[in-house]
Amino acid sequence: MIVVTGATGNVGRPLTQALAEAGEQVTAVSRHAAAVPDGVRHVAADLAEPQGLTRALDGAKALFLLLSGDLHAPAAGPADIIDLAAASGVRRVVLLSSQGVATRPLGQSRIAMRAVEDALRESGLDWAVLRPGGFASNALAWAESVRTQGTVAAPFGDVGVPIVDPADIAEVAAACLMDERHTAKVFELTGPEVITPRRQAEAIAAALGSPVRFHELTRAEARAAMTRFVPPELADDTLDIIAAPNAAELRISPDVERVLGRAPRPFNDWVARSIAAFR
């Protein structure tokens, strides 16, 4: 059995589906009750209280570990989840980390995530670490303003990074959970091209067949919006990257293709699959 945490999110949902379709027994974990694919067991648990995962981990051979923003904080203790997994008989853990652990290692949230990576390496378990850059699905933050005002509002409109489709992250995660060839490896996951927020707005407009205006936010405006959903230090870390990505953050990684045998999906593909959210 494979346990998927964050199973209702942009990565966890397609990962759960992919594992189920591959014939794996899957336990989907989320904080609240949720619909899951046929044949998948659901367990409601909060990762901030690791002992709540005990039932989910019973009989599991592998764990996909996704930590929400509040669990990146140093006071959280997500490494306890790895200890619990080992004690429960789990043999393999795939951790969703962050590209910034390597590209900007001194930020508070990245120091905390590096500690989780280190705990996993030292656990004695089989492991793989996924380090994605920005997610294509972050564009869903614009869905309401596109629907109601025909507008995308974002900072740094002409600064781009190679954002990755969460479906690609999910497929790589599935491969790492099921295939021992990917053990003890770190995968940097990006999309196939650098794309700016302005160009993302243009892609949404093209898929809608109607104009979408781009409005550039100041950094302060963007930070105020982000801190409604994530801790301030995580918002600052993110804004630092998207304001002035360094060479490592602009690099197109070959790792999606190495694992999946195909190029990563471009942003336009994600938009085509997600366009209903913007109508």
Image (cartoon, rainbow, N blue to C red):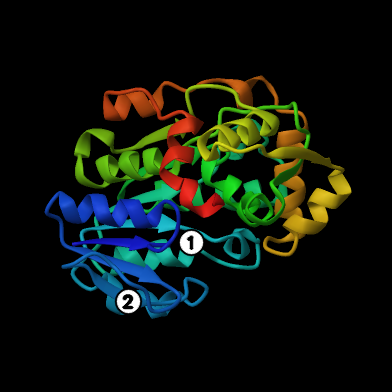
Query: Residue 163's x, y, as percent?
Result: 55, 33
Foreground pick, 153 / 118: 153
Point out the tag, 1 or 2, that comes first from the N-terminus. Answer: 2
Q: Residue at x 45, y 48 (%)?
A: 96
Foreground label between 1 and 2: 2
Query: Residue 36's x, y, as percent?
Result: 29, 68
Say above or below: 161 vs 168.
Answer: above
Query: Residue 2's x, y, as percent?
Result: 23, 59
> Residue beneath label 2, please?
43
68 displayed left or right of 234: left
Amino acid under disc 1: Ala
Q: Residue at x 80, y 49 (%)?
A: 222
Foreground pick, 146 / 233: 146
Circle number at residue 79? 1
Foreground pick, 70 / 163: 163
Q: Secondary structure at mark 1?
A: helix
Is residue 190 visible from the viewing direction of this image? no
Query: Residue 174's x, y, as percent?
Result: 27, 45
